[in-house]
Amino acid sequence: MSPVEIRDRWRRNTRLQDVGTAVATFVAGLAFNLIGLTGIWTNAPRIGDVPSWWHTVLLAIGCLGMLGKRRHPLAALGVGTAATVADGVIGGSVALVLVLFDVLFAVGQHASARARTAVTTAVFVMIGTAGVVGGLATGEFRVAVFIGLNLTTLLFVPLWWSANVRQQRQLGLLDAERTAREAVVAERAAMARDLHDVIAAHLSTTVIHSGAALARPPDSDRDRDTLRAVRTSSLAALEEMRSMIMLLRADDPAAADPTLPGGLDRLPDLVASAEAGGLRIDADLSEVPGLPAVVGHAVYGIAREALTNAAKHAPGSDVRLDLRPAGDLVIMTVTNTVLGPGALDHQALSAGTGLTSIRERAALLGGELTAGREGTDFTVRATLPRHPAGARS
């Protein structure tokens, strides 16, 4: 088993952590006992001579109590306290101080709020009582202060430290939850923008088809073709809108693995729809194997917006659509001839956000999009990474 696997198993297995902590405490305490760190409570009342190995026996009892500190912290505290008191009666040892520190820390980590309050109150009463009694017994105020400081270090510091660790953990969880919520909000906002782009493109196509039919003399065959194109565009809009709405209503859209509405496989249908609207398109769609769905969706969306703009601003123009891989990039270029001033017959046909939207889409993937006049042509050129960070195939 590799060190990384051992570390991951240690982090996941809390029972293993508790056993490891108990064993490490026993080994360290045994070492302290062997080098003579016993009899530390020199002024405390105690019974007569007791074999030194009793310190190790009490240490073992305390370490066994540590094994239940996560599920039964108060019981573990009771065992640790009893072992420490018994150890103090025979002189005390540093080893049991380690045990008492650990079980007090565990109470602060795993006990209920009411139990933590009760233990903290008992600790303060014990510290105050011991300090007052010690000071009165010796008649010296400095002895009372000394006893209070020592007991504070021994009994209160683990509770204070545990409270600080617990607070930091809670703040970390709150921060993680806030980050997750922000990610969901951002995901929903991106989906809402996609939904807007999809519906706007299909509605624009519908308006262009119907406007062209109304501008020409009646022709039953041609008008039926127009109605079929309008119906196809409307059905596609409904399908994609339904898919997006289901994602927007999901509890965790980021965790869902939807089939994105639109990819490279649908580019030929997009070209056919644009040609039905009057554009003359020369398409060169090269194979781009292994392209992640999110990149294919972006390519489709950019092509759809570029063709929709061409149909709105230059109906009947010649369009060149080129898609090709270039190393680690995918380059798509849509060029249409500019026939004259804009052909829009209603301001609702252009909200002025289409190019901004596809430019943002390219930037989110780490790519770049340019759009503008090049002589007598208008060109939209998108350069996207084939494998952006975090993309799914």
Image (cartoon, grey):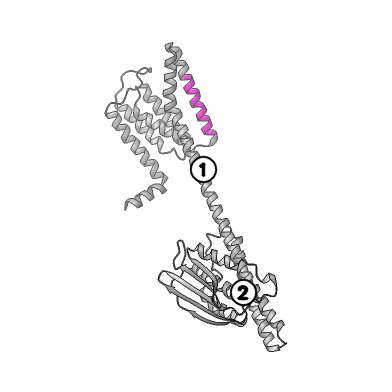
Neighbor class of circle 2 (other Cα within 10 Å; few <14, some 14-19, many 20+) is some
SS at badge 1: helix
Q: Which residue is mark 1?
A: 171
Majority secondary structure of the magenta segment?
Answer: helix
Which mark identifies residue 205?
none
Looking at the picture, which amino acid does disc 2 mark?
Ala
Compared to residue 255, the image places residue 377 above or below, namely below
Residue 188 x/y as whole percent: 58, 59
Looking at the picture, which amino acid does disc 1 mark?
Leu
User: Quarter of the image holding residue 244?
Assistant: bottom right
Residue at left 28%, top 26%?
Answer: 36
Residue 157 x/y as whole percent: 44, 30
Q: Which residues are magenta?
A: 114-129
Q: Which residue is mark 2?
A: 236
User: Quarter of the image holding residue 302?
Assistant: bottom right
Q: In the shown orientation, is residue 177 left or right of residue 245?
A: left
Residue toward you, 200 or 306:
306
Residue 263 x/y as whole percent: 52, 72
